[in-house]
Amino acid sequence: MKRHHLLFYFILMFSVFSLSSCHDNLFTHDHIDADGEWGIPIINKKIGLDQLLDRMDSVQYLQAGENGVFKIIIEREANELVSMRHIFEIQDKTYDSTGVVYIDTLPTFQVTELLPINLSSEDVLVKSATIKSGILTLSFNITSANFDYTAILTSENITDMSGNPIQLNFSNTQHQQSINLSNHKIMPNAMGTLIIGATITVSADVPVYQISYECHSSLTNFVIQSLTAQFSPVEVELDQTMGFSLPLNKFQFDHIQFNNAKASLFSKNSLCTIGGSLNELSLQGEQSGTHPLISSPVSLFSPLSANQYVQVAETNLQPITFNRDINALKLRGDLNVNPDGFAAGDINVDENSSLSLKIKTEIPTNLSVDNAVYHDTLESSLYEAFNVIASQSIEKITIRIALTNAFPFDLTPTIEFLNTKNGEKYQLNLNNVQIHGSYNGVPYVNEPIYIEFTNENAQKIIQSDKVIFNFHITTNGNTVEITDSQYVNIAMGAKVSYSTINF
């Protein structure tokens, strides 16, 4: 009988130590708690703020400053808020002209201003442009007589890439022609107008002293590749909502208030000088609505900065109350494009010229917390240490829980053991023990908690493969700072008594 017990003892110990070597990443025997090893280690985990948040997502949102205080960083970009189309854009247009020409030479005569095409306006004076795409269609007809003629319509203001003026041929049998203006250039006259002229040759049996004509043109699908122009100020509304998802999935809370936050606004501007104001900066949630971050407008001034972001504004924010459903940052304001107007002189832009904004909110973890709950599920190694024979011999199991809290907030833990195979949970009775916060910078170490289980409850503990932790969190009305040196350490071990062996 003793030999059987001895063999069972060695099998059990072999399984326990084998388990230990397989889970060095979860715990170490030498540091199960401050007093050294205690029984079979279940969990020994040190949790900092980056572990409290979802580890993968927290990287992009969490930074530690020079003093070690964590900051939540929300950084988002709004691209091409203002582009060249806000300054100059030509919709499909038609131009018409009719007239009478008195002829002084035959058979060929000139009409210097047959048709004006005015691309400028009281708000824009076009100096030159390169056309990316567009079709110019011209119709021409002499309406005063029935004789043969040829007409060459041309414009010194519209040239191809080699600098040659456009040229279209018409006759009494050919009244319409089109030309693809892609890669052509335009250089309007001092009034910002393109002039179409004509060289006309008539063939008539009797002298011709005058003619009547009609000319029509249309511009379609007209897109500018680059532009030099003068223009008046242009008002553009800024209205952007930028989504984000903070890594708070492990928390449940009504609200957490953050203080001393600030926002910086950066612009990348290859367009022209832009001024204006940011009238609204707010957080938004689907259920909780809008949470303003500024109480008055913030002035903006964006100089040219074609290839990089430059800071154009910085402002302190009101205390921020984070609700769990907050998932967007809203910007609203008014932008004044080219505030100096025509006095700014010629402005050169191209199809890629635009204004983009980047906003960066820095929210130090200077906060107060009321009624928040942190939830986490950790793997339990206890059930792996026992085979069926060993677990049936268990008479009693004692769970020891030791917690060290270096965070400046109080923790009230609840702990459950979960058997994922049957979904059964067993909650430990901790008698509402409270782990005080480290408000003076010295980690608080609680007196270890010992809980004994016998028979059926002991089996529930052993057969569970996960441990569920819930920590109720409060700062007790204090405003605290969270740093990269703060943590909570959870150490849980078990001692088992058998009906035939006690170790």
Image (tube, helix red, strand yellow):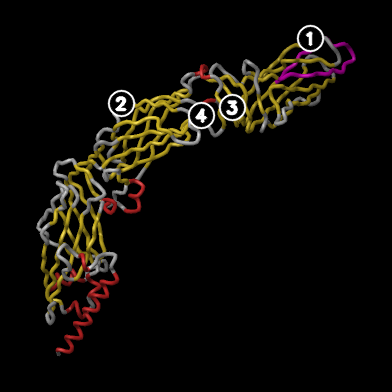
Going by the picture, which residue comes out furthest to the front? 66
* Towards the viewer: 474 or 253: 474
Range shown magenta: 196-215
Residue 341, given in percent of the width and then of the height, sits at 50, 18
Alpha-carbon span between mark 2 and mark 1: 68 Å
| Dot in front, 4 or 1 | 4
Alpha-carbon span between mark 1 and mark 3: 38 Å
Quadrant placement of the C terminus: bottom left
* Towards the viewer: 274 or 386: 274
Q: Which corner quadrant of the image does residue 396 belong to?
A: bottom left
Alpha-carbon span between mark 3 and mark 4: 11 Å
Q: Main secondary structure of the magenta part?
A: strand
Question: Which residue bears the numbered disc 1?
Answer: 102
Asked which secondary structure carries label 4, the reply is loop
Q: Is residue 293 above or below residue 2?
A: above
Alpha-carbon span between mark 4 and mark 1: 48 Å
Q: Is residue 321 above or below residue 19?
A: above
Q: Earlier in the sequence, mark 3 or mark 4?
A: 3
* Towards the viewer: 19 or 397: 19
Q: Earlier in the sequence, mark 2 or mark 3?
A: 3
Residue 316, given in percent of the width and then of the height, sits at 29, 32
Which mark, by number, is residue 296? 2
Give the residue at x 20% y 47%: 372
Q: Earlier in the sequence, mark 4 or mark 1?
A: 1
Question: Which residue bears the numbered disc 4?
Answer: 271
